[in-house]
Image: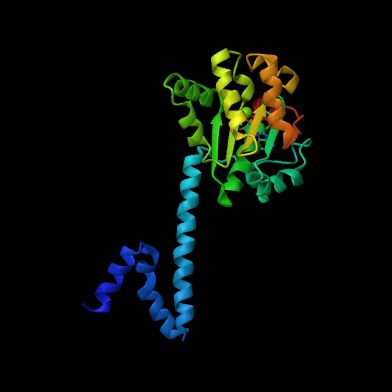
Amino acid sequence: MTHEVTTPLMLKQLYLSTIKLYFEETAEQAQKQHWSYQKYLATLCEMELSHRLEQRLARRLKESKLPQGKTLSTFDFKVAKSINSAQIQALSENISWVKKAENLILFGPSGVGKTHIAAAIGHSLIQQDIRVLFVSTMTLVQQLQQAYKDYHLPEALTKLSRFELIILDDIGYVKKDVQETSVLFELIAERYESGSLIITANQPFSEWHQIFPDNMMAVAAIDRLIHHATIITLQEESYRKIEAEKIRSKQF
Ligand code: ADP
Ligand code: MG
């Protein structure tokens, strides 16, 4: 068999699908522009790697279940005066806090942009190849509770440990129920110094005894969360309310 026939077959066997697709057309370009053999090979390798990265990021984005459109580019920092945009930018651009398994806790009343900021940071980190999961705390607690009932809690927690960052949205919506919130504690304990969490919350820590079955557990959870954490409190008026008022004032 000639190399025209065997080369594509070998590239397929080697899982080099992008090189397989482009090696002939790139060879023509290489000839025309008098590239060295080394440059030809390097160009093909770069194409393969960049296509693989693109595919990986698309996979990461899909598995993250992040809400669409909630990115830094759609967040108006001029409205959110209590937020230090440089700090949010730093958390988005510098992955070292995730590599060190540190946490971020966003406090503030409803509608001020906690979920948006958390999701936006998640989006940026995915672009830097970090595995992220966004989930409502209530949903996750229900899933873990089911796993507990099925005697699969350790396996469920191990599955979650693949994510370098888990965004637990609205922790305060989970209400005291001994079994339910014990699994939330298990998750927090499991991730302590091993994986990052971003938590959004309407209530300050002083009200977290409403989430956990007893005060001891609330204190133990908070202790683990804040040992290595950035805590940000958003204090603006509800963005939802401001937007609704703008629309209303246009109507009348
Ligand atoms: P919270 O989680 O604090 O309740 P959200 O993040 O859900 O608030 O924000 C409510 C809505 O307002 C969302 O649609 C969000 O995208 C939008 N929003 C909030 N703050 C801003 C902002 N500063 N710029 C742009 N959109 C914002
Ligand atoms: Mg929210």
The image quadrant of residue 199 is top right
The image quadrant of residue 195 is top right
- Identify the image's colour scheme: rainbow, by chain, secondary structure or one colour: rainbow
Seen from the viewer's position, the closer of residues 105 and 98 is 98
Look at the picture and state if 4 lies above or below 69. Answer: below
Report whether residue 9 is seen: yes
Location of the C terminus (image quadrant): top right
Look at the picture and state if 129 lies above or below 27. Answer: above
Query: Where is residue 248 drawn, in percent x and y?
Result: 66, 25
Query: Where is residue 226 drawn, in percent x and y?
Result: 72, 32
Check the image and name the residue furthest to the left: 1
Q: In this view, does 74 lie to the left or right of 51?
A: right
Seen from the viewer's position, the closer of residues 140 and 22 is 140
| Residue for point 47% across, 21% down | 148
Query: Where is residue 183 drawn, in percent x and y?
Result: 55, 22
Query: Where is residue 109 drawn, in percent x and y?
Result: 71, 24
Q: In which quarter of the image is ligand 2?
A: top right
| Residue for point 35% across, 75% down | 24
Q: In this view, does 229 lie to the left or right of 9?
A: right
| Residue for point 60% across, 47% down | 125
Q: Is residue 115 left or right of residue 141?
A: right
Look at the picture and state if 47 lies above or below 177. Answer: below
* Number of residue marks: 0
Report whether residue 202 is seen: no
Location of the N terminus (image quadrant): bottom left
Check the image and name the residue furthest to the bottom: 34
